[in-house]
Image (cartoon, coloured by chain):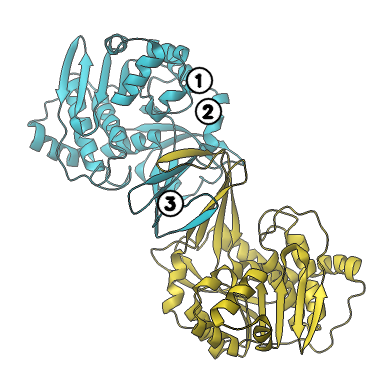
Chain colours: A yellow, B cyan
Amino acid sequence: MIHIVGHTAIDHISKVPHLPEKNCSTHISDRRIYFGGGASNIAAGIATLGEQVTLHSCVGDDFGGSDYDQWMTRLGIHQQFFVVPGTHTPTAFMFTDDKGDQMTFFEWGASKAFATSDAPSLPLVHMATADPDFNCRVAEQSEFVSFDPGQDVFWYTKEQLESIMVNTDILFANQHEVKQMCTTMGITREALICQVDMAIFTMSGDGSTLYTKGREEFIPVVPVTLADPTGAGDAYRAGFLSAYVRGYSPLTCCKIGTVTASFVVEHIGCQTHLPDWETMVVRYRQHFGTLELPRKEGINV
Amino acid sequence: MIHIVGHTAIDHISKVPHLPEKNCSTHISDRRIYFGGGASNIAAGIATLGEQVTLHSCVGDDFGGSDYDQWMTRLGIHQQFFVVPGTHTPTAFMFTDDKGDQMTFFEWGASKAFATSDAPSLPLVHMATADPDFNCRVAEQSEFVSFDPGQDVFWYTKEQLESIMVNTDILFANQHEVKQMCTTMGITREALICQVDMAIFTMSGDGSTLYTKGREEFIPVVPVTLADPTGAGDAYRAGFLSAYVRGYSPLTCCKIGTVTASFVVEHIGCQTHLPDWETMVVRYRQHFGTLELPRKEGINV
């Protein structure tokens, strides 16, 4: 069982002819609702790849029985939710005009409850973006910890990042997050890498790099027709973690993450085009050749 | 049975610390969802006052079984809905910052289907803001017609307003709408009034005036603690029409409309504080004295 901690969120993506000035209005020509939230995206990816996953999120009383709830149930995601009465499930409203300019309104909603919630002690957990203090407590109490600070990296203090990094086995971050973590912690990129067993740094469309045991290995992206890059990082982590618990080598895990992400970016939405394990393997072979057998027994936690 | 034609809509009212610039984001500190749409507000008011009402609206496939659907069922509103697959029920997103500045994003959604829908022939109908062409056809085919152009007054052409006014018995409008109608039609306020049996012009917190049979009568507002003026006009029309079908004189209908509106403005939301008939009568007596018996038999249509 892989445990994922962080946001479950709902994204409203709207097109408008123009963004409004203050005290003005505009018409929405198209609005689509997507299931999102970093932790939920990762859990959905893992479940679709066929691994057991438990999602730890804060949701509002609008969640139970909702389309999103039903979707998770169909995927087989186990929910360990804090249901916060009188709040909404975190929701983002994104408006994009004809020129591509955007405005985003984000409702943190139920996720406020992370700050005061009891942190679970977990055998194998990935902590996606969420409340820094909650993540510190989860990391401290859990056995094997994977961490990505995500867009909330700015909310972490030096002390919080130091506390989490001491307890982290695998760090995922993109270039912006690496830079921000180094700035906040006052250390170099190399020093950051040395703090964990494995660091995986992603570079959007330019591939990713695995740092482990003093070695550095580059994994190129799988070329696909890009529809929407959102969710690529979450899909990468889902692929990596699913492969990791099956006992694949870290480099193969990165390749499986890369292949998993290549499906997600072909469609708009973070959970709309997730591959199952067999579908992933077909594309893996096309791009990376034979999928070696796992180096070791899978982790059964 | 009173028939109401026009929008059923959902209002998301959010507070933000500051409105975003282009390509920036902001946090929502509070978001509340209210049931709205001019036609639906009027229907809810009429149903709560105890009259039979049928609502003609366009809704998306998100409506059936929703909280709003259940609310209408509890109120006893008869639904004559065009359900438009692949669309949303009209939805407004309003964001207000700490200084009181606003931005509004309005999704017309399912209401686009009015333009191509068959118009019903109705014995007694109030047409709230909706598609001008659809309203023209409803007015032409119906027996007794009440009309308010609402915020969509700008969408009407001269020909459309002329066509509707020929078939209209009662006109409701606020000062802005009267001005816009006169400009579009190229006529004076007096000429506009002469086109209908009854014209009721509302002046926000400054009361309303009834024009009928060459006479002009002023109805003062009922003084209350104002929480939110939104929905006052719809509540006024609900009160007026409910009283009208019970056979009350036009002046009494206006007073009942005024009293009904006074409840709605005491709370945020258009359908959150509607009075039943008895509650309305108590406040009527406090402000306007004895409620005379209806002048004539009620209308049973």
Residue flagged by tag 2: what amino acid is it? Answer: Phe
- Is B6 above or below relative to A133? above
Chain holding disc 3: B
What residue appears at the point 39 percent right and 30 percent down from the top-left corner? B151
Residue A20 appears in view: yes
**Under tag 2, what secondary structure?**
helix
- Is A76 above or below relative to A248? above
Q: Which of marks 2 and 3 is in front?
A: 3
Q: Residue B133 carries which label?
A: 1
- Is B195 above or below relative to B221? above
- Is B21 above or below relative to A133? above
Chain holding disc 2: B
Indicate left or right for A108 with B270 as reference.
right
Pointer 2 local density, CA inside 10 Å: few below 14, some 14–19, many at least 20:
many
Does mark 3 fall on the same chain as mark 1?
yes
Report x, y in % for residue A157. 49, 79
What residue appears at the point 24 percent right and 36 percent down from the top-left corner? B261
Report x, y in % for residue A224. 81, 57
Mark 2 or 3, nearer chain start: 3
Cα separation, mark 2 vs mark 1, equals 8 Å
Report x, y in % for residue B217. 16, 19
Of residue B296 and residue B264, the one placed in the foreground of this image is B264
Does mark 1 fall on the same chain as mark 2?
yes
**Under tag 3, what secondary structure?**
loop
Residue flagged by tag 1: what amino acid is it? Answer: Asp
Q: Residue B19 carries which label?
A: 3
Mark 1 or 3, nearer chain start: 3
Q: Do the residues labelled 2 and 1 touch (CB within 8 Å)?
A: yes
Chain holding disc 1: B
Residue, disc 2: B114
Residue A275 appears in view: no
